[in-house]
Image (spheres, rainbow, N blue to C red):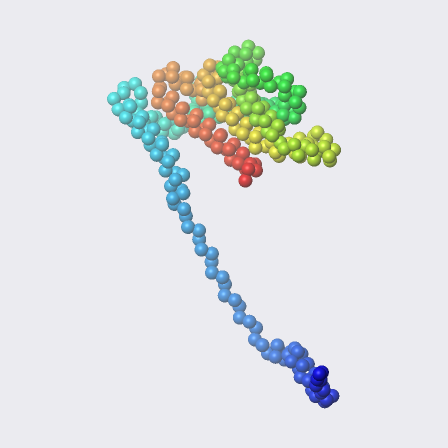
Amino acid sequence: MVSAVFHSPLEAAAADKQRGATTRPNTAGAAATPAPAVAPAAPAAARTPIDWRSIALKVLPPLAGIALLIGIWALLTIKSTSFPTPAMTFDAAVKLFADPFYSKGPNDQGIGWNILFSLKRVAVGFGMAAAVGIPMGFMLGRFEFLNRMVSPLVSLLRPVSPLAWLPIGLLVFKSANPAAIWTIFICSIWPMIINTAVGVQRVPADYLNVARVLNLSEWKIITRILFPAVLPYMLTGVRLSVGTAWLVIVAAEMLTGGVGIGFWVWDEWNNLNVQHIIIAIFVIGIVGLLLEQMLMTIAKRFSFDD
């Protein structure tokens, strides 16, 4: 059975009017509604607490190591009359660095000038090595025939002592300064060649296959594909090379003379000034550490391991 409810036309009109009244916006009421209050400002973010434990783990171990070294040094030199104590060396360092840039002639200059002259030689020799070694590393890694031809020469010459190259430089250039630069060049070029070549060889084959599909030129393959992928390897070679260059320049300057930290050490030995020799050892180590840390920071900046 089907039942239906019928409404009269008057009741239907009244219902429609009632629905329209409920759905029609109340403009008068909207105008009379007060503006909402401004929301209170959000509380300031809590300050991140300082991780003192992490800072202590980074700072205290190096300080403890340095203190241990100085303590052993002080114990071993308590009764020594020829080797200076840490206190004597510190007093000499204060006097030495009070005027590090004095100049009293070509063979009597402050330690600051000697460091700058050594860094200048390192920069020239290292720059020449980078200009030659990095492109050669790209070519050795890229072309198999060239790699097989040059790799035996690199393996043969790389282990040669740096000082063995110095007489060759003196013979060719007839001067101490270019001979020292030549020694830096020939000794710091090998890490850049080897690391760059290894980086090129480890580039995924898929990258090169895509380059072949796109018919890229060799220049675009090197600049767009190989260079970004090889950059971390290349910077590792650069870091090793600058350490080698700074190591070599001290020994080269001892033999060639002139102005430089190596010559300064040898000159102080001739004057039997052991305190200045110890100071020079610390200075050489600190400068080498700063150079390495700078290049490590650059290498981390361009590292894509994460």
Most distant residue in the front direction: 1
Count of picture labels: 0
Q: Quadrant of residue 289?
A: top left
Tell me which residue sits at (67%, 79%) in the image.
24
Tell me which residue sits at (55%, 24%) in the image.
191
Most distant residue in the left direction: 79
Whether residue 102 is visible here, answered yes or no, is no
Image quarter where the N terminus lies is bottom right
Front residue of this view, candidates 14 and 168: 14
Rendering coords of residue 212 (x, y %): 72, 32
Front residue of this view, candidates 107 and 267: 267
Decide if residue 209 is on the left or right side of residue 230.
right
73 w.r.t. 213: above or below: above
Image quarter where the C terminus lies is top right
Rendering coords of residue 143 (x, y %): 66, 24
159 w.r.t. 73: above or below: above
154 w.r.t. 43: above or below: above
Whether residue 245 is visible here, answered yes or no, is yes
49 w.r.t. 35: above or below: above
Tell me which residue sits at (55%, 10%) in the image.
171
Rendering coords of residue 5 (x, y %): 70, 86
Q: Quadrant of residue 174?
A: top right
Most distant residue in the top direction: 171
Decide if residue 206 is on the left or right side of residue 126.
right
Front residue of this view, candidates 22 and 42: 22
